[in-house]
Image (cartoon, rainbow, N blue to C red):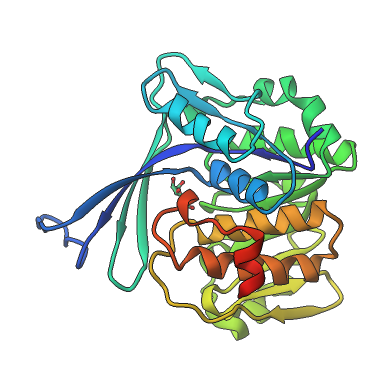
Amino acid sequence: MADVFVVGSINQDFVLKVERRPEPGETVTDAALSTHNGGKGANQAAAVALLGASVAFLGRVGDDDLGEPLLNALREKGVETAFTKEASDAQTGAAFITVTPDGENAIVVAPGANRRLTPEDVDAAADGIREARVLVAQMEIPAESVLRAAEIADAAETRVVLNLAPPRDVPTALLERLNPLVVNEHEAAFLLGRKVEGEEGARSVAQGLLALGPRSLVITLGAEGALVADGETVTRVPAPQVEVVDTTGAGDAFVGALAARLALGDPLPDAVAYAARAGAAAVTKEGAQGALPTPEIVAAL
Ligand code: RIB
C-alpha cells in the first residue's frame, strides 16, 4: 500500500533557455537546449517520494524510446510504477518549454500517450487507489479518468487532491469530492470567469470557488505563498523569499509536498505551509523533477 496514489501525466521536457520569446513569425536564436524528466503527474509523484511518503503512479507512456527512461527515473526515486503501462502506437508525452532570464516559463505540451489513460485503466488500478490515504490528480489526462479515480477514492475515504492544471472544465461531481482543490491565480480565474490577482484578488474569490463544490481550497500565489480556505476561514500562508532560477515544476513540488504531508497526518494549513517551502525550493534550480527538494532542503528554508 502506498501513502499517496498519483494519477496523471508523464512527459519528456525539452527546455529552451532564451533571452526572450519570439513574436509570431519571428525567429530568435542563441537558445540553450536541455532535456528533463517532467509531466505534472510524474513530477508530483517524484516530489512525494523525495519528501518521504510512499507513492504509486498511474499514467501512460508511448511505445517509443522516451517512455522507459522516464519511468526508470521515477523508480530510482522510489515511485511504484507497476500501474503505468505503454500505450501502443503512441508517442510519450512531450513538453516544449521556454524559460526567460527572470525564471518564468511558457509551456506547450504534446500529450501523446497521456490522452490514452482511460477510465477502464483507472478501474484496473482501483485497489491501489482505495488503499492509499491520498489520491492526487491534475488535468493533463482525460477528465473522465480523473473523475473515475476521484469516485473510487471518495467511496473508499481516500482523500482527493486535484491540481486543476492546466485549467479545464470539470463536472460538479468531481469538484465536490476535492479536499482540497488546488489552483493558482490563472486557474481560479478560469473557473470563475474573472481576473484574480494577488492575495486580495484570491481572498475575494475564495468563497466563490468553494461554492463550486470543493470541501476545501488552496490558491497558490507564487512568491506570496498560498491561501487556504475551508469554508469557515481563509488564511494566508507565506513562502520564503528565494532567488528565482526556473519556475517550471514549482507548482508540482507544492502539490506533491502537500499530498505527502496530508498523507503523513498533517492538518491542511500545516501541510500547505510545508508545501509553500517546497515550492519555493523548486524555483531555485533548473528543470522540473531535477529541482524537487529533499526534506533537508525544505527544512533549511
Ligand atoms: O508543471 C510542469 C510540467 O508541466 C512540466 O514538467 C511539463 O511536462 C508540463 O507537464
Report if residue 210 is visible in the image.
Answer: yes
- Compared across the picture, whether 57 is left or right of 38 comes to right
**Foreground residue, 262 or 135?**
262
Q: Residue at x 61, y 78 (%)?
A: 239
Q: Is residue 138 above or below residue 128?
A: below
Q: Residue at x 77, y 72 (%)?
A: 229
The image quarter containing residue 100 is bottom left
Could you say where residue 154 lies in the image, as x and y percent from the top left?
Answer: 85, 41
Q: Is residue 177 above or below residue 242?
A: above
Q: Is residue 107 above or below residue 103?
A: above
**Foreground residue, 54 or 201?**
54
Q: How many marks?
A: 0
- Compared across the picture, whether 206 is left or right of 30 comes to right
Could you say where residue 217 lies in the image, as x and y percent from the top left?
Answer: 73, 65
- Compared across the picture, whether 260 is left or right of 69 comes to right
Q: Residue at x 65, y 23 (%)?
A: 82
- Compared across the picture, whether 167 is left or right of 37 comes to right
The image quarter containing residue 264 is bottom right
Q: Residue at x 52, y 25 (%)?
A: 116
Which quarter of the image is occupied by the N terminus? Answer: top right
Report if residue 213 is visible in the image.
Answer: no
Which quarter of the image is occupied by the C terminus? Answer: bottom right
Could you say where residue 117 lies in the image, as x and y percent from the top left?
Answer: 57, 26
